Image (cartoon, rainbow, N blue to C red):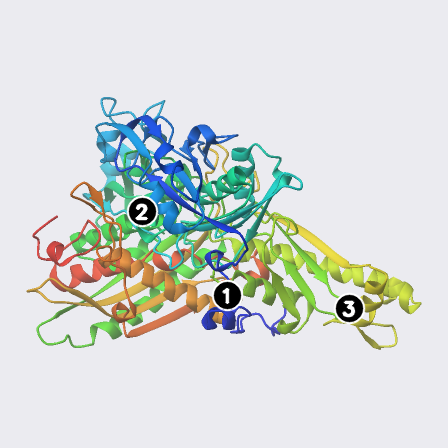
Amino acid sequence: MPEQFRTIGKAEIRKDAWEKVSGKALYTADIQVENLKYGAILRSPHHYARILEIDKTPALDSPDVLAVLIADDIPGETRFGSLVPDQPSLAQDVARHLGEPVALIIAESLKVAREARDKVIVTYEPLEPVFDPVLAARPDAPQLHEGGNIVTELNIVEGDIDHGFAEADTILEEVYHLPRVSPGYMEPETSLADWHFEGNSVTVWVSSQHPFTDQEFIAAALDLPVNHVRVISAVIGGAFGGKEDSSLAILAALGAWAIKGIVKLVNTRQESFLAHPKRHPAQIRYKLGAKKDGTFTALQVEAYMDTGAFASYGPAVSMILTETMTGSYRIPNVVVDTYVVYTNSPLSGAMRGFGSPQANFAVESMVDTMAEKLSMDPIKLREKNILKPGDKVFTGVTINETAKSLPVSLSKAQDIIERFRAIEPSKGKQAGVGLALAVQTMGLGAKVPDDSTHKLVWSSEGNVTIYLGSPDLGQGLATAAEQITAEALGLPYDQVTTQPLDTAFSPNGNVTCASRMTYMVGNALIDASEQLIQQLLSVAGPMLGLPVESLSYKNGYVVTPDGKEVPAKEITFPLALDSVVLMSESTFSFPYPEETTPQHLPIGMPHVMYCFGAQVARVEVDPELGTVDVTHFAAIHDVGKVISQSGVEGQIEGGVATGLGYALYETMLRKEDQWVDSFTEYLIPTSKDMPINYENIILEVPEASGPYGAKGIGEIPLVPTAPAIANAVSDAVGVRVTRLPITPERVLGFVD
């Protein structure tokens, strides 16, 4: 690996930056087309109800209404779901949650569509809803789906749990409650669909994390061949897992098919709250045993996850929640029972962290509680139990060299804690400092197809274009891809650009998620770059009248035996005149070698690669008001190798902001039989809530299999934030909050 890089590790300016900050970037809702028609969705006003009758007539009688569609009008598959095909595009017979789509109205204007929506007459028979996942798991609860309310049950055992607790001198038990959280992206869900008479096909613009999956679901719903559906990824205004849902793309395509025209659907913020995936609420019963010297001996966990009315990604989220229950620690005897349960709540699905924020809050809160019980320094207790390279976790996976970052993180955290403790509290406030470690998995999980394909094209001018097969969600994936490709080819960063994803031209790079995109894309593009170089040399030889084997390549030039450097464009330009294009494509598959990947677990388990990090929070608590201010914060994260300096910093700082909201503000409550559905009551942190004194400490412990040593950073920055703040609050006022968010009422003990 070269010691000096041309572009890797630099804070290159994103090529989409100016368009975004100037307002020129075209998000899906901004795309201008002629003869555009508008859609509005009629949604269920009930948490749970049987649909007895739908009368479209009054709506269809309205001028300028073009179609009113219900489930019976869908020509193909009426349900979809990446893991469990249980989610109706439009409710059929039963509506299982407030806000579930029941009918789609297409009209000449949005105003007319919304007015007509209110004229559709639906006769409902309300049913008794269930919202508590523990109660819903009982056999006598209302059953939302055939087969019962338990979607997935995981029972993972390692060692002898009774022996482990018998060895313990101290056993602690606690129940942690984690809230329902909205992704809160700036751009709500939106889609635009254009029907083509020629070819009986449709083009759909999406704001989505998995355009190729959208393509499959749309084709199935319209009963079309997949190649009759073209999906284009527009600029995306944030996703955080919530845009792994295909429902709006399906409905927009259905509307375009019905009227044989162009239809746009844009959710209001209220619709986004009610009908699109949230972070899973969880109830985690945690029991930890330790010896007098602090050695952990046993862990027993029972977790219930509320997946809402439909499974979405609940089964996969439960796997990562289960696998991260032991946190960053060696625990020899472990039992984890995890239940994913249907309720009549809004559906929960993918969200940044994918189960690990819930698990890490429990384990990091409990470790601090154990340190207090044993009268040990929380750092010393962690040092005694942290994972080391070569250790096996309870799923049977051996931890690799990247665990070397854990003791380094603790050492740096110790210095920061001492510095933060030396700061005098403000008048009338009590200060506290808290630490939390974090572990986050990478990849989709064992035995799950996890391939990512990407393409490079060398233009006649000597520039290189990347056809990314996975969408950039705004996090800077395209920039990282451009830097990696520029480095691999030895080209200036400005000579490499990325094309927007279009299923008609882009290879299938799989879904953008799971803290693995820089890793997957980078490895694929390094290989594609090597292929492209070999192609250049193979055509340069005959063109220059020299044996191919006598040529070499360096930084955009073909080097002849006498040392002459021929610019690549002097090769590619003549080729273009003959319509010859140098192009390479490479697929990288996430590595799950069978000899090192335990095979006894369900599909999707285990994950074999991990990210580690630590965060330290200093808070000031008003003992009379119960308010919590985070005044100082430090985030310590191992990224393997920095690809984009500004990208890494942005991911960490953004993750901390998300974690701050999880810790102190965010929860989607049910109030007077309605869910909180606006930012008036659902509070997210603003710039004023972020700690003024903030610092990033970026570690680089190379991942041997990663591009230039890089690994994931997309999810882990939010994972330790909430437990670090909770531990700081406990340090400040002696109150252990076990239910997020940490509200003044909980700090003062008015509510649990």
Question: Mark 3: which amino acid?
Answer: Tyr
SS category of the residue bearing label 3: strand
Residue labelled with disc 1: 25
In the picture provided, is 395 more to the left or to the right than 618? right
- Which residue is the site of mark 3? 553
For this orientation, the residue located farthest to the right is 545
Mark 1 vs 2, N-terminal side: 1
Q: Residue at x 50, y 63 (%)?
A: 476
- Label 2 secondary element: helix
Residue 296, percent across and down? 28, 46
| 338 vs 296: above or below | above
Whether 205 is drawn above or below 221: the answer is: below
Q: Alpha carbon of mark 3 to alpha carbon of mark 1: how far? A: 37 Å
Task: Indicate the amino acid at tag 2.
Answer: Ala
Q: Please, is residue 50 above or below residue 28 in the view?
A: above
Q: How many marks?
A: 3
Residue on which disc 2 sits: 359
Question: Which tag is nearer the camera, tag 3 or tag 1?
Answer: 1
User: What's the residue type where badge 1 is placed?
Assistant: Ala
Across and down, in percent, residue 616 comes to 29, 65
Residue 165 image-quadrant placement: top left
Q: Position of residue 82 (x, y in %)?
A: 47, 37
Mark before the other along the chain sequence, 3 or 1: 1
